[in-house]
Image: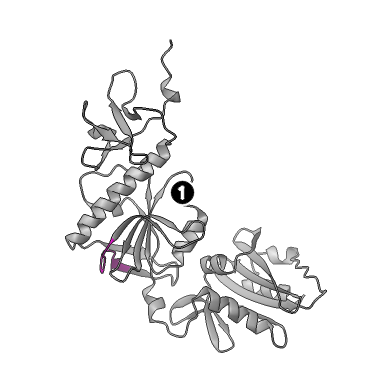
Amino acid sequence: MDKPLASKLILYRWALDEMGFPAQISQAVRGRHYTCPLCHSPMIARLGEELQHHFSHEQETGCTSEAVTRAALGRWITLQLRDAVQKHQVAKVEWTCARCGKSHSADVLAGGGPVHEGYQWGGGAGRFADVALLDTAGNVLMAILIQDDTMPTRETLDFLRGKDAFTVVVPASVTPAGSDFRALLTMGEIVGAACPVLKQVTNIIREGDAIRQALRDVVSRWPGYFYGALESVDGLSNVLKLDNAALWLPPEQWREFIGGTRNPLAPGIQVTMKEWPHHDGGTIMLYYASVRDTGAVGVKRYGPGQVPTPYIDHRFRNRNVTALDIIYYLVMQ
């Protein structure tokens, strides 16, 4: 019988050793016992001369190499993070804040307590972290995501960016050496973090239910529509001043709390449209425009029987247009 081609083999590069610690194939020793970090069945270290060294299951399973890698790397991160917290290590990082545009630095381990391997936030798709660091009150301080060809999803990233927690994405291809969690951080990317500026600003509405209600309320009274540019307030960008309230609406917050269909008009110009039913049988149209460095929001109520027909012509594809220009046109149609 012909030998299987190496290209057809699933080449697992991770397994768990006899102590339950993740081992890469480069660390494997012939004759030792290994298990799969995903299904926990026995694995064998294939260290021959004909094929690339790899682990394999003693009996065939449905574990993919990508899933096994994620599980093993997640276990490694969990163990190293727990060790770092227990030893009261300092892991200082710097990042440019997507919320206020300023540079910040902080110790990602400060106030850390329990470490969870595989963490789920209630219901909802994409609300998952491979590893999560919590404080003593149960709030998530840091979420770590392992990046492969399919994970994390846009929904996961949008959800976590709306949280007051560090979000770190680590490539599944990394090969951690030694036992240093701080070194692992240098291999990853911080894609979200709590904003110190946002924490200092008061009277800003940030919660989804309150934002949705404020937008409904503003069109429930005369004249039935509202539009405004997103501004900076006390150093915090993407703030919509609405009557006596101020809503914090960066793009990721809008996607999570409002949603809608995105319509790219030209490079750097995009409008998101969302339709809500109104309690009187009519319709509420919501618009979010992003034009290079400007943003704006518009809301308009249509009575029963009225059909919204938003349309944007070629005038709004030129480089001089602002987000408020587009929103004004949509609302006043």
Where in the figure is residue 119, as x and y percent of width and height?
38, 57
Using the image, determine if residue 240 lies above or below residue 42.
below
Left or right of 242 in this view: 111: left
Using the image, determine if residue 53 lies above or below residue 181.
above
What residue sits right under mark 1 in the picture? 151
Left or right of 324 in this view: 148: left
Where in the figure is residue 93, as x and y percent of width and height?
29, 62
> What is the residue that sits farthest to the right in this orientation?
305
Left or right of 70 in this view: 284: right
Using the image, determine if residue 285 lies above or below residue 13.
below
Q: Nearer the viewer, residue 178 or 217?
A: 217
Q: Residues within 10 Å of mark 1 (few under 14, many from 20)?
A: some
Where in the figure is residue 116, as x and y percent of width and height?
32, 57
Q: Residue at x 42, y 48 (%)?
A: 147
Q: Residue at x 63, y 63 (%)?
A: 270
Q: Nearer the viewer, residue 331 or 147?
A: 147
Q: Main secondary structure of the magenta part?
A: loop
Pick the quarter of the image with the N terminus: top left
Q: Is residue 183 visible?
A: no
Residue range corresponding to the magenta coloring: 105-114
Q: Residue at x 75, y 79 (%)?
A: 280
Which element is circle 1 on?
A: loop
Pick the quarter of the image with the C terminus: bottom right
Q: Quadrant of residue 263?
A: bottom right
Q: Give yes or no for residue 113 being in the magenta stretch.
A: yes
Numbered marks: total: 1
Q: Give yes or no for residue 117 being in the magenta stretch.
A: no
